[in-house]
Every structure is written in structure tokens, then in C-alpha cells.
């Protein structure tokens, strides 16, 4: 054998050791030469069929695109149609119907509960309004309102709104018992 350095791009000649390894691989593969040729032939046929099918598919996709364009079907229109179709299918599904029925029932029960609650609150307000303490409060408010009306009517010629409020507050303070007394100079003092 000749010892010569090989460059990176120069092919290395096949040596006897490599040939022995190839024959060992063939023995381990357990495929006869005839079977190997049949498999090779079948593989070539399949690859040709796949290539043909890809070409046919590409032609059919182009034709589909042309027909859609002629009909005015854009990808956006198609998306809308798909969404509408999906929505319709979902609405007719059993799960949707059951969920809708459950929500309707829950809504009816909630409405009934709020109605009952409203009736109870209304009844309580009616009871409260008829109570003696509310009647007393109502009378005090009516008295204050009538006092304000009287003061506003009496001072309509020369007073302003602030004077009326001060007068009403002073009148209200006189009706309320307190520890207020007059000092020597005439001013009020609370003790």
C-alpha cells in the first residue's frame, strides 16, 4: 500500500478493510439481493407517485383559487362563513342547549329571589313608617319645613336665603333644650 496524504477535497480510495465492513453490514441486514431490488423499485415508484400527486394538488389548488376569486370569495368571507357555521353548530349542540337551559333556570330563580327580597324590604319599610318613632321624626320634619316656609314667606321682602337659614337654625335651637344663657353683654354662652 502506498502512504500518501489525502487532501480534504480529494476522495479517499476504498480500501480492503472498508469492503469487508460493507459485506458484514449486508450479512447483518438479512435482506436478499432480490428483495433489495424489489424494495428499491417500489421506493422509486412511491417517490414518483408522491411527486405526481404534489403536482396534481398544486394544479387543483390554483384552480380552486381561481374559482373562488371569480365567485368573490375572499379569505375574509370564508372566515366569516366558517365562524357562522361553527356558531350555528355550537347552538344546536347538546352542551349549549343544556347550558342555556341551566342559565335560564338560574335567571328565573334569581329574579324570584330578588322579587321576594323586594317585597320583604317594602313590607319592612311599611312597618317602620307606621312605627311611633318614625311618626315622631316625620312630625319634626314637617314642623321644620312649615317653619322654614313661614320664615321664607315673612322675610320675602327684605331678607336673603342666608338670613332665612340662620333664622331657622336659631328657631330650631330655641326649641331644643340646652344649657345656654345670656351674658351681661347680651351674647349667648353655652355651658
Image (cartoon, rainbow, N blue to C red):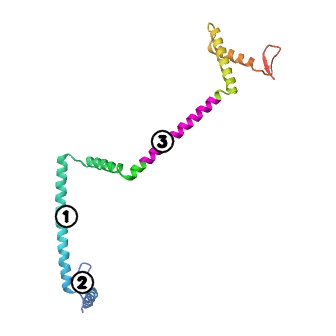
Between the C-alphas of marks 1 and 2, the distance is 39 Å
Asked if one can make out residue 68 in the rendered structure from this viewpoint, the answer is yes
- Residue 108 lies in the magenta stretch: yes
* Between discs 2 and 3, the one toward the N terminus: 2
Residue drawn at 23 percent across, 81 percent down: 11
Residue 54: give its label: 1
* Between discs 3 and 1, the one toward the N terminus: 1
| Residue 131 or residue 81, whichever sits in front | 131
- Residue 3 as seen in the image, left or right of residue 164: left
State the image coordinates of residue 5 (x, y, percent, origin top left): 27, 85
Which element carries disc 3, helix, strand or loop? helix
| Residue 103 or residue 171, whichever sits in front | 103
Residue drawn at 69 percent across, 23 percent down: 136
Q: Where on the picture, by quarter, is residue 173? A: top right
Which element carries disc 1, helix, strand or loop? helix
State the image coordinates of residue 137 (x, y, percent, origin top left): 68, 24
Mark 2 highlights which residue? 12
Mark 3 highlights which residue? 108
Q: Where on the picture, by quarter, is residue 59? A: bottom left
- Residue 19 as seen in the image, left or right of residue 159: left
State the image coordinates of residue 20 (x, y, percent, origin top left): 26, 90
On-image quarter of the C terminus: top right
Q: Which residues are magenta?
A: 100-127
State the image coordinates of residue 134 (x, y, percent, origin top left): 67, 26
Q: Nearer the viewer, mark 3 or mark 1?
A: 3
Residue drawn at 26 percent across, 83 percent down: 6
- The kind of secondary structure the magenta stretch mainly shows is helix
- Label pair 2/3, CB-CB below 8 angstroms: no
Amino acid at each position: 500500500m502506498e502512504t500518501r496524504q489525502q487532501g480534504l477535497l480529494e476522495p479517499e480510495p476504498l480500501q480492503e478493510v472498508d469492503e469487508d465492513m460493507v459485506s458484514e453490514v449486508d450479512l447483518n441486514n438479512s435482506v436478499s439481493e432480490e428483495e433489495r431490488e424489489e424494495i428499491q423499485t417500489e421506493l422509486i415508484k412511491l417517490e414518483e407517485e408522491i411527486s405526481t400527486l404534489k403536482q396534481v394538488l398544486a394544479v387543483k389548488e390554483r384552480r380552486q383559487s381561481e374559482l373562488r376569486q371569480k365567485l368573490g370569495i375572499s379569505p375574509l368571507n370564508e372566515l366569516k362563513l366558517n365562524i357562522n357555521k361553527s356558531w350555528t353548530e355550537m347552538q344546536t349542540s347538546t352542551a349549549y342547549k343544556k347550558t342555556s337551559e341551566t342559565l335560564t333556570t338560574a335567571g328565573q330563580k334569581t329574579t324570584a329571589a330578588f322579587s321576594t327580597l323586594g317585597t320583604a324590604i317594602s313590607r319592612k319599610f311599611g312597618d317602620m313608617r307606621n312605627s311611633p318613632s318614625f311618626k315622631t321624626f316625620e312630625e319634626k320634619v314637617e314642623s321644620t319645613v312649615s317653619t322654614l316656609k313661614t320664615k321664607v314667606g315673612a322675610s320675602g321682602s327684605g331678607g336673603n336665603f342666608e338670613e332665612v337659614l340662620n333664622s331657622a337654625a336659631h328657631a330650631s335651637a330655641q326649641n331644643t333644650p340646652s344649657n345656654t344663657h345670656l351674658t351681661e353683654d347680651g351674647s349667648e354662652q353655652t355651658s
